[in-house]
Image (spheres, coloured by chain):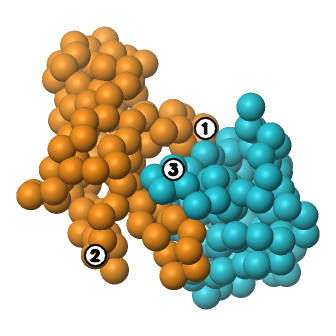
Chain colours: A orange, B cyan
Amino acid sequence: GDSVTQMEGPVTLSEEACLTINCTYTATGYPSLFWYVQYPGEGLQLLLKATKADDKGSNKGFEATYRKETTSFHLEKGSVQVSDSAVYFCALSDRSGAGSYQLTFGKGTKLSVIP
Amino acid sequence: SQTIHQWPATLVQPVGSPLSLECTVEGTSNPNLYWYRQAAGRGLQLLFYSVGIGQISSEVPQNLSASRPQDRQFILSSKKLLLSDSGFYLCAWALPGQASGELFFGEGSRLTVL
């Protein structure tokens, strides 16, 4: 079945440091890929997405490129802020047997940014 | 615009007591609906999804159940809670047939079973 593997956390960075959170996937079809963010005490919000190979998703200074050859979708940001502290989830979407799309999530990576 | 609400936001229940978490979506019709559980250190686990009224698919066998009595209402229930049911429960919706499969999440309900 489909699966998502993302780097274990927690990750602690100083403000303005570079961020990379690795994410790789296995899927039988041609999934869409997502990064979701969960701020403390809240639900998940979509951060960015890519629907086909070589697409780059970007939002709030974060970027991720859909790499089919390496089955990866690494999240990057050049300069993190304290407000970026959150849990980040990589996910893929594939069509289920019932015809609906389902998301398969990685386990999440907790990021803490210190001033 | 579409919105999703779930309640209660927090719940503390004794072992063996019943559970009911409710989720409603506004501003869309015939959404696909989902219940996820987020347990400490275990990521997100899909529990149930529904593509229409009365249509429920279960992903994980357990003592929880789900119902969809109305198009935009999704309820998670248990007759007798276990300690292992503690966690953060998230309801989500998606547009039917949307190719990307993007989900929109509610605020979450934190359940503590003592």
Tell me whether the residue at label 3 lies in contact with that at label 1, contact meaning CB atoms closer than 8 angstroms.
no
Q: Which residue occupies the foreground of this view, A66 or A23?
A: A66
Using a 10 Å C-alpha cutoff, classify the residue at mark 1 as few (fewer than 14 neighbours), some (14 to 19) or many (20 or more).
some
Residue sitting at x 47%, y 61%: A103
User: In whole angstroms, how far apart are the C-alphas of marks 3 and 2?
Assistant: 19 Å
B26 in relation to A18, above or below? below
Of badges 3 and 1, the one in the foreground is 3
Residue B102 marker: 3
Residue sitting at x 54%, y 43%: A44
Residue sitting at x 44%, y 42%: A36
SS class, disc 2: loop
Residue sitting at x 60%, y 38%: A42
Residue B36 marker: none
Q: Which residue occupies the foreground of this view, B66 or B81?
A: B66
SS class, disc 1: loop
Chain-order first, disc 1 or disc 2: 2
- Chain on which label 3 sits: B
Residue A42 marker: 1
Q: Is residue A104 left or right of residue B46?
A: left
Q: Position of residue B27 (x, y in %)?
A: 80, 40
Same chain, marks 3 and 2?
Answer: no
Tell me whether the residue at label 1 lies in contact with that at label 2, contact meaning CB atoms closer than 8 angstroms.
no
Callout 3, which amino acid? Glu
User: In whole angstroms, how far apart are the C-alphas of marks 1 and 2?
Assistant: 32 Å
Question: Pointer 2: what residue?
Answer: A28
Callout 2, which amino acid? Thr
Callout 1, which amino acid? Glu
SS class, disc 3: loop
